[in-house]
Image (tube, rainbow, N blue to C red):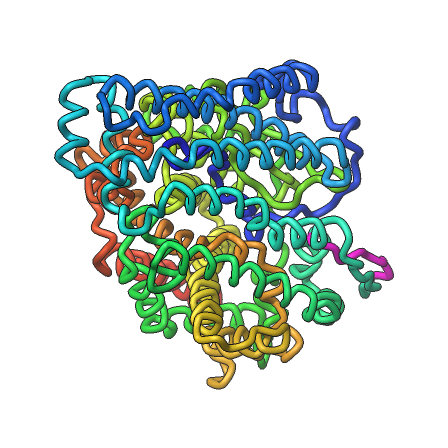
Amino acid sequence: MNKASNVIVVLSALLVFFASQVLSQTRERSEVPVKDRWKLEDLYPSDEAWNKAKEKLVAQFDEVLQYKGRLAKSASELLTCLDFNSRLSREFGRLHSYAAMKADEDTRNSKYLAMRQETEQLATDYNSKASYIEPEIAKMDKSKIDELIAQEPGLKVYKMYLHDIQRTKAHTLSEKEEKILAEASLLAGGPSSIYMIFSNAELPYPQVELSDGATVELNKAGYARYRAVPNRRDREAVFQAFWGAFNNFRRTIGVQLYANVKKDMFYTRTRGYNSSLESALDKNNIPTKVYSALIENVNNNLDSFHRYLNLKKKMLGVETLKYSDVYAPVVKGIDLKYSYEEAKKLVIDAAKPLGKDYVRVVEKALANRWVDVYPTPAKRAGAYSNGGAYDVHPYILLNYNGQYDDVSTLAHELGHAMHSYYSNKTQPYPTADYSIFVAEVASTFYEALLMDKMLKEIKDDDVRLSLLMSYLDGIKGTVFRQTQFAEFELLIHQKAERGEPLTGDVLSQLYGEILKKYYGHDKGVCHIDELYTVEWAYVPHFYYNFYVYQYSTSFTASTALAEGILNKEEGAVGRYIKFISSGGSDYPIDLLKKAGLDMTTAEPFNKTIAVMNRTMDEIEAILEKKTK
């Protein structure tokens, strides 16, 4: 299933991993109430039904070969082929969603892992057979494409796809070469798959004894929980033990990451791009200057980030801020906890500025088991939204543990789910899929609505301080931290493209230099222990091919959009609903322009920095009032 339909559509944050890690895994899945488990029966009533659907789909694969060599002959031939391809892709998205989500319920379950692998193998098999489609279309010129569209109204739904092939035809290879690349996808996912299984299921995580005498396991879930404990010595012990475990495997994980970078280079070179960055961004027609400008803008505004870190230092009352302090709670005695029922009410109320229809769909999602709520043993860590089942509805995976961050993560994933819902409802299948560049706008936008609701209703200074710092933590994690990752990702690709080695030790050195720059290590803002420079080995996003920068750009876009709606600007709600209903009917940059944002300028970023400094002004005012 080729890029006409983007077969595997797992639209999400995938692992919004630094905002929402599982905090405890105490209940078996069978102990979780049915109402709090997603209802995958909406996809297929049973594994047997899934298998029958798979066999029916596979039986049709060879039919695509009948259109080979005929696409330019007539508009009807082209339409019949594209409709066939789209129909198979649509069903495949449903098949893969079921297998992948069943596998994520328990990553130890080999049955569902095998089913997911089988769907990925089938995608390769079909893509190999259909590999002639794009080369044949690329051989036509734009005038021929427009002529065929004029002759056959049914082709209008494929106009974006057809024109995009023309735009990228210089990078489309011959039929034989495209077939080879389709087969190569069997190998391409190896580094990522190995990393995910190793880091989630088999890496030997350490245990530490805390000051209260409790012995805790520092897997990903435990690290996310205990890195934020109030006792400073406990936090340092957690950091030392956790990063020590990763450091022990830095050579192996370094080889995995280098293999992934080389995979990116393989596709870059075979398709004739100048760099891996250009190759990755060209898929959605994103200018590389958007990426470089983000890094430049963030580096030019590190003083605002250092202001935030100095505020954290002041509120913690420490002489030297350490990296092990950055997740610590800064307001003593405030531990905001929310049951899942309370969280549902909060996110429903937060959605009200977007109108009754939007709220109705949110209520439907929460009532009809679109969400898998609680952490269970070996469940996939983090959170995501899967909008790949076009004919059904989106699904959400959570690992909910009752913290405010968990409420915010629910809002984040609902933002994705609503984007998928409106796009799938409004757009025909070929234009329903949207890029990650715009996906993260919808998710962080919903988070902004939630924060606004909380701050409007809570007047207590200490609680406001906690929430305001939580908001700044979000900017830290989404704008600065993800750009830090983006800068590292660009650097390691550039080094590999120059033929320079990337060992685990080299990766730690490179990451450490960037980490220290961002956190002002040499300026005395925040001390970075050398051991923590292995943090790169913990980040799954480095296997997603220039993915992380979109968190940052999307956050700046959503901040600007939310400001418009919360300030009740005329037409702002309508523009936003139209934006999340547009799917992939245009390029991401153009979709955002229609929503009122030009992402090729610094304006959205500057608005975010202004909001950040305004938030810090309020925090400083509250702190000053409390000292009087």
Occupied quadrant, residue 337? top right
Q: Residue at x 54, y 19 (%)?
A: 57
Magenta stretch encompasses residue 64: no
Using the image, determine if residue 484 lies above or below residue 383.
below
Residue 222 rendering spot, x and y as whole percentages? 73, 54
Residue 476 rendering spot, x and y as whole percentages? 46, 61
Using the image, determine if residue 87 lies above or below residue 100.
above
Left or right placement of residue 386 versus residue 6 in this view: right
On-image quarter of the C terminus: bottom left
Q: Residue at x 46, y 85 (%)?
A: 523
Does any portion of residue 24 appear in the rendered image? yes
* Image mark count: 0
Q: Residue at x 36, y 33 (%)?
A: 133
Occupied quadrant, residue 333? bottom right
Q: Residue at x 43, y 20 (%)?
A: 87
Left or right placement of residue 507 versus residue 291 in this view: right
- Nearer the observer, 274 or 65: 65
- Nearer the observer, 392 or 29: 392
Left or right placement of residue 189 versus residue 200 in this view: left
Using the image, determine if residue 342 lies above or below residue 482.
above
Residue 300 rendering spot, x and y as whole percentages? 32, 73
Does any portion of residue 363 appear in the rendered image? no
Q: Which residues are magenta?
A: 212-220
Occupied quadrant, residue 125? top right
Residue 235 rendering spot, x and y as whole percentages? 70, 67
